[in-house]
Image (cartoon, grey):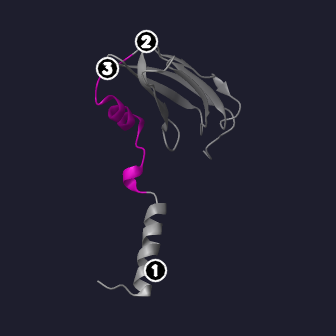
C-alpha cells in the first residue's frame, strides 16, 4: 500500500484529533456506577473509616479532606455534585506504614463527598460528609 503525502497528513491529523477529543468510554459515570465498579457489586457497610471534611468551605477551589482506614488496601473518594464525580483512588501496598491520606479537592457546589474503603478482608466501608460551598470551584 502506497500513501500519498496528502493521505499521510490526513491520517496523522485524524490520529491527533482522536487522541485529543474525549471519548464516551472514558467518561467517569455516576456515583452509583463508580461505586459498583469499585466494589464489584458487593454490599457497602459503615464503620472503620474516618472521613474528615469541613462543614462549610469558603472557597470550592481548595477544600481540605482526609481519610483514615486502618487495614484498608484502597480508598476511593467521590464528589457527587461535580461534573466528574471521581476525585481519586488511593492504593496502599504491604509496606504502607498507615492507611491514611489528606489532600485538597475542588467542589463545584454544595454536595456530598463520599469515601469508600476496600478492607484487607475484602469488605467495603463507606463514610460521607456534606460540604456547603459558598464560592464555586468547578465553574458550577
Assess disc 3: are there few (<14), some (14-19) or many (≥20) residues with their C-alpha within 10 Å of its C-alpha. Answer: few
Residue identifier under label 2? 47
Circle number at residue 122: 3
Which of the two residues, 80 or 73, is positioned nearer the viewer here? 73
First in residue order: circle 2 vs circle 3: 2
Assess disc 2: are there few (<14), some (14-19) or many (≥20) residues with their C-alpha within 10 Å of its C-alpha. Answer: few
CA–CA distance between discs 1 and 3? 51 Å
- Foreground mark, 2 or 1, reads 1
- Foreground mark, 1 or 3, reads 1
Asked if residue 22 lies in the magenta stretch, the reply is no
First in residue order: circle 1 vs circle 3: 1
- Foreground mark, 2 or 3, reads 3
CA–CA distance between discs 2 and 1? 58 Å
Circles 1 and 3: CB distance less than 8 Å?
A: no
First in residue order: circle 2 vs circle 1: 1
* Secondary structure of the residue carrying numbered label 3: loop
Residue identifier under label 1? 9
Quadrant for the N terminus, please: bottom left
Amino acid at each position: 500500500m502506497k500513501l500519498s503525502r496528502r493521505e499521510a497528513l490526513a491520517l496523522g491529523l485524524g490520529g491527533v484529533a482522536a487522541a485529543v477529543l474525549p471519548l464516551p468510554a472514558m467518561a467517569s459515570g455516576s456515583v452509583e456506577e463508580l461505586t459498583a465498579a469499585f466494589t464489584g457489586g458487593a454490599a457497602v457497610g459503615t464503620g472503620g473509616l474516618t472521613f474528615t471534611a469541613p462543614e462549610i468551605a469558603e472557597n470550592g477551589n481548595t477544600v481540605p479532606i482526609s481519610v483514615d482506614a486502618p487495614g484498608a488496601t484502597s480508598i476511593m473518594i467521590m464528589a457527587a455534585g461535580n461534573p466528574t464525580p471521581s476525585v481519586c483512588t488511593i492504593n496502599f501496598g504491604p509496606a504502607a506504614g498507615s492507611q491514611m491520606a489528606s489532600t485538597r479537592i475542588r467542589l463545584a457546589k454544595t454536595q456530598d463527598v463520599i469515601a469508600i474503603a476496600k478492607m484487607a478482608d475484602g469488605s467495603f466501608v463507606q463514610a460521607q460528609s456534606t460540604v456547603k460551598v459558598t464560592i464555586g470551584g468547578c465553574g458550577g
